[in-house]
């Protein structure tokens, strides 16, 4: 089975970090968001992927090629025209004779993908949410989906589409996407995957849903930190250091130099970082950053940044220098 992973977005809500890196390469719990997704796919036996790139495509491609042995192809979405459009861009790599998994590249899921194929029909991952208005929403008759609506003002249910789509009829999906694009059927200015799936239903395809409880958004600093906390709960990794107190869960890369500090709980300290005379908790210190004499809480420190002084909450992009006199 092939996975289509759209990762073309700019990630504006994660600026300044996304000025230098695409969102999917931001570090969470010791590796890029995209790394968590590709590892999950490999664990579940999916070894073919098409990654739809756009913003900072070269960095995504380099990361994947140098870290993964996947059978991977890249498709370029130069203009961000919606999720339906990005899947359409990948159409040439989609085979008609095998099911397809579409998995959004900016979200980490904790789910057994066997659930997706369980019904034998097309199936969408869903989660019950209090306010589904900023999601695609499904309405069912108890077994099958009867209607799909993208970001409705008056939601027909509280069942939100999480961004995991198992498609057993890729040929029909491609034909519905073709129709959307050929007839310029946009919704909120974009070609919506939800609309193509609704078209598939109207043409007789049956869709079920499967529950996804573990749905971790990485779209803004506070949700990135929440996802970091969640992942660390499951995979704390560190070795004991001299003159340093470690309060798990944490991720501390072996190459990180830690001196006279308190790390954790919920701290990610990435490769080639230096942390001295500091307290770092509920924060991400990205590759190559240096933190000295600082108290960091709920902070994201970009790659190769230098932070010196007493701060509490910092959101510092790559290669910055923050010094307190
Ligand atoms: C996309 C989909 C939407 C889905 C959501 C999940 O929206 O269009 O149906 O519920 O992802 O995150 P976006 O978040 O890209 O606006």
Image (cartoon, rainbow, N blue to C red):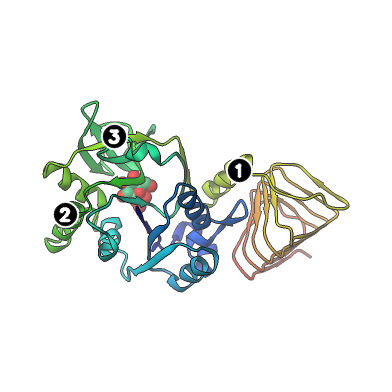
Tell me the residue at 32%/46% (across/down).
165
Residues under numbered marks 2 and 3 in contact, where contact means CB atoms less than 8 Å apart: no
The answer to whether residue 196 of the structure is visible from this angle is yes
Tell me the residue at 62%/54% (across/down).
30
Q: Name the spot of residue 120 as percent of width and height, x first.
A: 27, 38
Residue 229, disc: 1
Q: Residues within 10 Å of mark 1 (few under 14, many from 20)?
A: many
Q: Name the spot of residue 90 as percent of width and height, x first.
A: 29, 63
Q: Is mark 2 within 8 Å of ligand 1?
A: no
| Image quadrant assignment for residue 255 | bottom right
Alpha carbon separation for disc pair 3 and 1: 33 Å
Mark 3 vs 1, N-terminal side: 3
> Which residue is the site of mark 2?
176
Q: Is residue 182 left or right of residue 246?
A: left
Disc 2, SS: helix
Query: Along the line of sight, which residue is nearer the eye, 159 or 108?
Result: 108
Tell me the residue at 32%/64% (across/down).
80
> Which residue is the site of mark 3?
119
Q: Residues within 10 Å of mark 3 (few under 14, many from 20)?
A: some
Q: Name the spot of residue 286 as percent of width and height, x first.
A: 64, 61
Report the quarter where the C terminus lies.
bottom right
Mark 1 vs 2, N-terminal side: 2
| Image quadrant assignment for residue 321 | bottom right
Disc 3, SS: loop
Disc 1, SS: helix
């Amino acid at each position: 089975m092939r996975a289509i992973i759209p990762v073309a977005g700019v990630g504006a809500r994660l600026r300044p970090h996304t000025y230098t890196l695409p969102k999917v390469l931001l570090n969470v719990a010791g590796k890029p968001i995209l790394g968590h997704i590709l590892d999950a796919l490999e664990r579940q036996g999916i070894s073919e992927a098409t990654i739809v790139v756009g913003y900072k495509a070269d960095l995504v491609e380099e990361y994947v090629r140098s870290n993964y042995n996947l059978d991977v192809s890249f498709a370029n979405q130069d203009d961000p025209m919606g999720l339906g459009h990005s899947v359409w861009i990948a159409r040439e790599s989609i085979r008609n004779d095998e099911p397809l998994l579409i998995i959004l590249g900016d979200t980490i899921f904790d789910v057994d993908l066997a659930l997706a194929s369980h019904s034998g029909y097309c199936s969408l991952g869903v989660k019950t949410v209090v306010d589904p208005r900023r999601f695609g929403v499904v309405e069912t008759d108890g077994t099958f989906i009867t209607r799909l609506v993208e970001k409705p003002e008056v939601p027909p249910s509280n069942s939100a589409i999480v961004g995991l789509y198992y498609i057993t009829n890729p040929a029909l999906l491609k034909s519905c996407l073709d129709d959307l694009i050929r007839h310029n059927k946009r919704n909120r200015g974009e070609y919506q995957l939800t609309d193509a799936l609704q078209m598939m239903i109207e043409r007789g395809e049956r869709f079920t849903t499967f529950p996804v409880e573990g749905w971790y958004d990485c779209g803004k600093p506070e949700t990135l930190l929440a996802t970091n906390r969640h992942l660390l709960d499951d995979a704390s990794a560190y070795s004991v250091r001299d003159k340093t107190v470690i309060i798990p869960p944490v991720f501390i890369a072996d190459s990180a130099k830690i001196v006279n500090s308190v790390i954790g709980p919920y701290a990610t300290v990435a490769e080639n970082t230096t942390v001295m005379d500091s307290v770092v908790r509920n924060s991400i210190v990205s590759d190559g950053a240096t933190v000295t004499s600082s108290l960091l809480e709920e902070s994201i420190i970009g790659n190769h940044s230098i932070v010196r002084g007493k701060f509490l909450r910092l959101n510092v992009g790559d290669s910055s220098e923050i010094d307190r006199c």
